[in-house]
Amino acid sequence: MAALNSQSGFSIGVTFLLIILVVLPFPSHSADPDPLQDFCVGILNSTSTSLNGFPCKPASEVTSDDFFFDGLSKEGDTDNVFGFSVTPGNVLAFPGLNTLGLSMNRVDYAPGGINPPHSHPRATESGVVIKGKLFVGFVTTDNKFYSKVLTAGQMFVVPRGLVHFQMNVGKGKALTFTAFNSHLPGVVVLPTTLFASTPPIPNDVLTKTFQVEASVIDGIKAKFGA
């Protein structure tokens, strides 16, 4: 009888433990830490040290204007080597996003323009085509390439940290709005990272990496003003 009671108690204990594991919330895997307050309008010029965000403006000084941003309403200047323009709506432009774990960009494309291969180390990206026709693609960590041509009203997603691009393949201008699960997703643009860094990456590294002569590397660097 004692053994039976022991087994019964063990079974109840295991069942209780499983119930607890099911109902408890799983740890957050969002790009930014979950906020512990309603809002934290960032003080961008603060000299105080802060982790994963800027110090908060005192609530008594917060106004309605801190929660609205019109920076994405104007078309960007696409007169550049790539024929595109990114207008950021991250915490640096819109301090009201501080600690909230999201941001948006406006991306304008001239005919034939390209948002060159790049990655966002701190966020997954989703976007919707507002105008035009875009060829969108990304590459996974096992070198699998996914791509599709999208038109107005269609949406795409790029998993966090993966290299991706968007290219205007329509006859006119194109426009997208993109969203990120970070208030400051960061960006690594491969052409400028490799060929226009300060100080520059040594030519020996680049020639060996791309298996080309130094003159080819010099030619590419010249196009980026390096």
Image: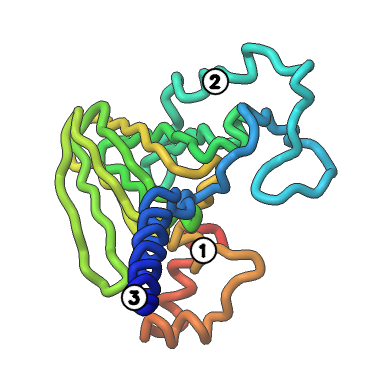
* Quadrant containing the C terminus in the rendered view: bottom right
Residue under the point 49% across and 73% down: 218
Quadrant in which residue 139 is drawn:
bottom left
Residue 53 position in % (x across, y down): 67, 43
Q: Is residue 123 visible from the viewing direction of this image?
A: no
Q: Which residue is mark 1?
A: 193
Q: Is residue 86 left or right of residue 42?
A: left
Q: Earlier in the sequence, mark 1 or mark 3?
A: 3
Q: Nearer the viewer, residue 197 or 156?
A: 156
* Discs 1, 3 touching: Cβ within 8 Å: no
Which circle, 1 or 3, is nearer the viewer? Answer: 3
Quadrant in which residue 200 is drawn:
bottom right
Q: Residues within 10 Å of mark 2 (few under 14, many from 20)?
A: few
Circle 2 SS class: loop
Q: Earlier in the sequence, mark 2 or mark 1?
A: 2
Q: Is residue 202 left or right of residue 21?
A: right
> Distance from label 2 to label 1 (Cα)?
30 Å
Residue 1: image tag: 3
Q: Nearer the viewer, residue 129 or 213?
A: 129
Q: Which residue is mark 2?
A: 69
Which circle, 2 or 3, is nearer the viewer? Answer: 3
Quadrant in which residue 40 is drawn:
top right
Which circle, 2 or 1, is nearer the viewer? Answer: 2
Q: Nearer the viewer, residue 58 or 148?
A: 58
Residue 190 position in % (x across, y down): 44, 62
* Discs 2, 1 touching: Cβ within 8 Å: no
